[in-house]
Amino acid sequence: MTRRGFTLLECLVATVIMAIAVAALMSAITTSVRNAARLTDHDRAALLARQKMDELLVADGLQKIIPFEGAWGPEVTGGVPMGWIARLTPFEVPRHASAGTPFLERIELEIWWLNGQQRRTFALEGFRRAVLTRADLAAVKAQ
């Protein structure tokens, strides 16, 4: 008489192999979820950065030379602490310029956010046409 089925040893070996495969799969899924969350934060920061750069490009009366900053609320960032630091500097000012002379102004924008305890950043740079004011001339001479 032949017996059909598996021995206890065969069942244990199959269970161990299955446990190893499931553990590896769970590790891969955890890594994928962590990477997806990190990319989501980066994509959100990039979207908010483009929006802030657009605002700065059209804004009047911004502070020159001295950095200024702000932060977005948790309702916009998905609860991730996120903010920005901007600085406007003259880029191409003619040598003997006077008030009313057109020139290029550089907008440097750094976006930051927290990923756990680690601070992540990236920078954007934009340019806009501006007209020199007396305050701009004083700032250029002070540099």
Image (cartoon, rainbow, N blue to C red):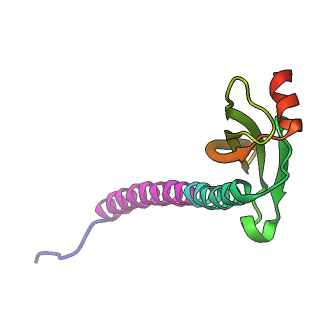
- Closer to us: 80 or 101: 101
Image spot of residue 49 (x, y percent): 66, 55
Quadrant in which residue 3 is drawn = bottom left
Residue 115, placed above or below residue 132: below
Image spot of residue 129 (x, y percent): 66, 47
Q: Main secondary structure of the magenta part?
A: helix
Direction from residue 140 to residue 107 in the image, left or right = left
Residue drawn at 73 percent across, 39 percent down: 101
Which quarter of the rendering shows the N terminus? bottom left
Which quarter of the rendering shows the C terminus? top right
Total labels: the figure holds: 0
- Closer to us: 49 or 126: 126
- In the rendered image, the residue lying farthest to the left is 1
Quadrant in which residue 96 is drawn = top right
Residue drawn at 41 percent across, 54 percent down: 20
Residue drawn at 62 percent across, 44 percent down: 127
Give the magenta range: 8-36
Image spot of residue 19 (x, y percent): 42, 59
Residue 112, placed above or below residue 55: above
- Closer to us: 49 or 105: 105
